[in-house]
Image: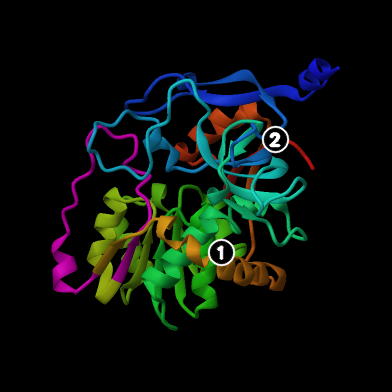
């Protein structure tokens, strides 16, 4: 009877693994979905939380972990391990826990494997407090990407009423939140995106004052000058490269650039060389790199404030949801060609 009980406690666990390290542009063949098994109890003697994943987040930062780095290289996180589940943020339901802060049935978000079940470390999990809102929001606006936007714009950008703000990748998971926070702060906001459909979304859904399709512009600096003739006080950068170079020409005295990402550079063998760096000196521009790792201490305050904005209709959420773990590799790669509209996530199961 004991053996039968143990056998019943083991279930299938599909996972997305990295097959080989990537140089240049990744392909779906660099990843594969494999079938493993998992026990539905936390192993005896360990302190962990077993989570059934409901949603997986797709984020550009995962690309860097798909390459092999030399020892001593500066990276945001360690390389993925070949043959093991890739890792990113997700939303799930606790199945079992040996940690006093979590119990079976709790809804959580945090660092998770790209798999159906994850044995998660409790220090990288957060309880979901607003279950009246869609759980999928915790992959984005109420999760890591929302906190990234909030901490980057509010803490690093330090907006003032009347500031002129430019946001690149403005319809993406981070950009859509930044633009709406800027409007709440009383700023004039312009965004760029990669299609006319996304530009329309920025103006009609997210409240941007103006927006443009960067793919239709032959001169980015001129495009910025037309829409922000008085210059830019805050640039929230998720793109880097030529866009950042063009923005430097338009920065106002004492402006702030929040460098959150450089998606235009991730798949290049040789990075774009900036030419307009002198403007940082001439206009006393503060350029500061931003990642969310140093800001999780403010999560509780952020969650309450952002949930309030959503309920009040001050922040609108657009999500691009793809069904099934088998779709995860294609969903991730779509980020780098702009296929997604809004926050890209993968739904694994309804609960």
> Looking at the image, is mark 2 or mark 1 nearer the viewer?
2
| Quadrant holding the N terminus | top right
Q: Which residue is disc 1 drawn over? A: 203
Q: Residue at x 78, y 40 (%)?
A: 350
Which of the pair 314/204 is nearer the observer? Answer: 314
Q: Residue at x 52, y 74 (%)?
A: 183
Q: Residue 224 at x, y = what percent?
A: 34, 64
Q: Residue 188 at x, y = what percent?
A: 45, 75
Q: Residues within 10 Å of mark 2 (few under 14, many from 20)?
A: many
The quarter of the picture where residue 68 lies is top left
Q: Which mark is residue 2?
A: none
**Label total for image:** 2
Q: Which residues are magenta?
A: 256-285
For label 1, the SS is: helix
Q: Residues within 10 Å of mark 1 (few under 14, many from 20)?
A: some
Q: Residue at x 67, y 72 (%)?
A: 308
Residue 244 falls within the magenta-colored stretch: no
Q: With respect to residue 124, does 162 lie above or below? A: below
Q: Is residue 341 visible?
A: no
Which of the pair 11/175 is nearer the observer? Answer: 11
Which of the pair 12/29 is nearer the observer? Answer: 12
Q: Find the distance from the CA under tag 2 to the CA under tag 1.
A: 32 Å
Q: Which mark is residue 348?
A: 2
Q: Is residue 40 left or right of residue 252?
A: right
| Quadrant holding the C terminus | top right
Q: Is residue 234 visible?
A: yes
């Amino acid at each position: 009877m004991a053996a039968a009980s143990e056998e019943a406690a083991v279930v299938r666990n599909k996972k997305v693994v990295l097959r080989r390290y990537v140089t240049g542009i990744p392909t779906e063949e660099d990843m594969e979905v494999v079938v493993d098994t998992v026990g539905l109890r936390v192993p005896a003697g360990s302190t962990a939380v077993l989570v059934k994943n409901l949603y997986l987040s797709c984020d550009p930062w995962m690309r860097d972990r798909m390459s092999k780095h030399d020892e001593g290289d500066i990276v945001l996180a360690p390389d993925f391990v070949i043959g093991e589940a890739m890792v990113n943020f997700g939303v799930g339901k606790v199945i079992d826990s040996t940690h006093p802060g979590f119990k079976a049935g709790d809804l959580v978000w945090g660092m998770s494997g790209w798999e159906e079940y994850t044995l998660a470390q409790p220090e990288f999990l957060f309880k979901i407090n607003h279950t009246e809102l869609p759980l999928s929001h915790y992959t984005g606006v109420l999760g890591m990407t929302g906190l990234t936007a909030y901490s980057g714009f509010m803490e690093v950008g330090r907006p003032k009423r009347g500031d002129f703000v430019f946001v690149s990748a403005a319809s993406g998971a981070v950009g859509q939140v930044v633009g709406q926070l800027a409007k709440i702060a009383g700023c004039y906001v312009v965004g760029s995106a990669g299609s006319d459909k996304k530009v329309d979304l920025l103006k009609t859904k997210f409240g941007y004052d103006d927006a443009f399709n960067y793919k239709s512009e032959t001169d980015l600096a001129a495009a910025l000058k037309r829409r922000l003739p008085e210059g830019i006080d805050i640039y929230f950068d998720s793109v880097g490269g030529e866009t950042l170079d063009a923005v430097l020409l338009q920065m106002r005295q004492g402006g702030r650039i929040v460098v959150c990402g450089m998606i235009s550079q991730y798949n290049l063998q040789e990075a774009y060389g900036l030419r307009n760096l002198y403007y940082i000196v001439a206009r006393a521009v503060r350029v500061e790199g931003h990642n969310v790792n140093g800001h999780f201490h403010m999560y509780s305050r952020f969650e309450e404030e952002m949930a309030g904005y959503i309920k009040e209709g001050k922040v609108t959420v657009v999500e691009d949801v793809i069904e099934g773990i088998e779709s995860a590799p294609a969903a991730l790669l779509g980020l780098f060609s702009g296929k997604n509209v809004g926050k890209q996530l993968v739904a694994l199961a309804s609960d």
